[in-house]
Image (cartoon, rainbow, N blue to C red):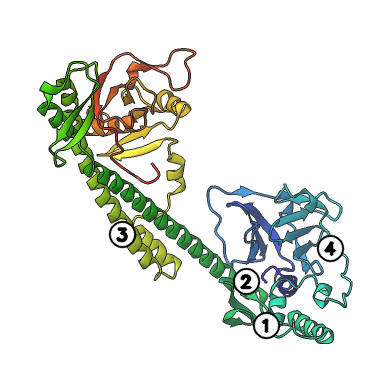
Amino acid sequence: MHNNYYFLRQLAPALTRQLAGFRVATCFSQEKDELVIGLLKDEQEFWIKAQLSANFPVLALPETFHRARTNSVDLLPSLLGQEVADVSVFPHDRVLRLHFTGGGSLLFKLYGPRPNAVFRAAAEAPAELFHQRYTADADLAPAPEPLPDPTNPLRSFPGLGDVPPRYLRAHGYDAADADTRQRMVREVVAQLENPAHFYLAAVEDKTRLTMLPVGDVEQELAPDAVAALRLFVPLTLGRRAYETELRQVRQQLEKRAEEATISASQARTRLYALEHTAGYRQTADLIMANLSQIPAGAAQVEVVDFYQDNQPRTIKLKPSETPQRTAQNLYRKAKNQKIETEQLQERIERRETEALWCLERLEELAAITDLRALRTWRKTHDLLPATKAQEAAELPFKVFTDSGYTILVGRNAQNNDLLTQRYAHKDDLWLHAKDVTGSHVVIKQKPGHTTPEPVVERAAQLAAWYSRRKNDSLCPVTVTPKKFVRKRKGAVAGQVVVERERVVLVVPANPFERAGA
């Protein structure tokens, strides 16, 4: 009810008593949706901080305020020097009005969806809007007095808001007859017009400043509207920040746990398939054991599989190559298959460990009940959100780090162009799967250092993984300094010419397996 008409009825005379004779000394903003007004009278100061965001409009009344040296902007220059005469509220509405001695006014429209501040330097002067998109606010004026509604007494008082009906229902309003309802509403309105107390209460898991005891009452306050706001606003903002951060970190951990579990499951499925199918080495052994039975140019051969209880087995061959050559290729694939098996086992262990770590952190999270402890805990576990500077520095590519080297991977043809033509330095290493479409990969160089071969190999695996050769056993990858890569005039996005290169053979893989990469 901090923006409710009946609360503003209490706030307006309290502000009149405190602000009469004060002059506006400064008016500025240093955050989005914020209007800060500083008033002076002799040596006294008074601050109004209007937070005019749609999700939580509120008038904060801090006892002191220190303006930031940077990132603040002066607003409403005609407001400076205006002397407050009194403060009032629109009847049955959520609009607080400061009257100035020269005939001007400043309205604080505290509607949840469309809050605003409207200033007029004089009675007939044009309106100046804080949120200029709400142009209709230039004509903001009190609404006509509501007519009594004998069938629904709540409609006779449109400024009640949501708390009084909740209070009435808790006291039997729904089951009462018409006369009793009329009496109950009149009694509640009388209580709101002359409250004995204000209350800090939890209503549907939100901290509310109310004029009636509803929900879980945490604190009973004296009916001092200024003091109540000074207590309620910082408390609520702190709790809202805690609830927001708690929700964010919980979602972050749940997402990481889910992604790690899915990745481990996929790796385990692939490993099972490799371990329960005839391997390349077994097939090569069978070919070599039956060389004398394989005619030249055969497309297949049927052999006795001594690995599977001498069951018959048909092996497909390439008529264009000798059986010995086929076996040689299969032995090479078997070596790569062993590497893949080891990588899958490592991935399963790493991702299952990560999922378990996330679940343990989620259990710890349930015991953290305040913002300061939450932020300390996030810092301890490296779960702090990215700063604005970090977000600004984020690149529009897949980003990996390896031994201190940054590896960038293009996401599509246009993104490849951006990476190679704009972000890659001439001495950076440039990689691409040979003779097929795929992502451009760049290893950012460290001046005076040669990129270690293991880093080059893992970057090459990424280039193969993000290409049409992803499912090949081995993939040739071009590696060259960016200065030997150029784009012909008129070439399509992502198409380049490589003037010098070396080629490395790698197993297509994502050796980093990082969530979100």
Q: Position of residue 322 (x, y in %)?
A: 18, 18
Marks 2/3: CA–CA distance: 44 Å
**Residue at position x 82%, y 49% in the image:** 126
* Tag 1 near tag 4, CB within 8 Å: no
Q: Foreground: 195 or 271?
A: 271
Marks 4/3: CA–CA distance: 60 Å
Of the residues shown, which amino acid type is indicated by label 2? Leu
Q: Nearer the viewer, mark 2 or mark 3?
A: 3
Q: Earlier in the sequence, mark 1 or mark 3?
A: 1
Q: Earlier in the sequence, mark 2 or mark 3?
A: 2
Q: Earlier in the sequence, mark 2 or mark 4?
A: 4
Q: Earlier in the sequence, mark 1 or mark 4?
A: 4
Q: Which mark is residue 229?
A: 2
Q: Position of residue 1 (x, y in %)?
A: 67, 72
Looking at the rendered structure, the secondary structure element under dot 3 is: helix
Task: Give the residue pinned by disc 4.
Answer: 142
**Residue at position x 42%, y 44% in the image:** 390
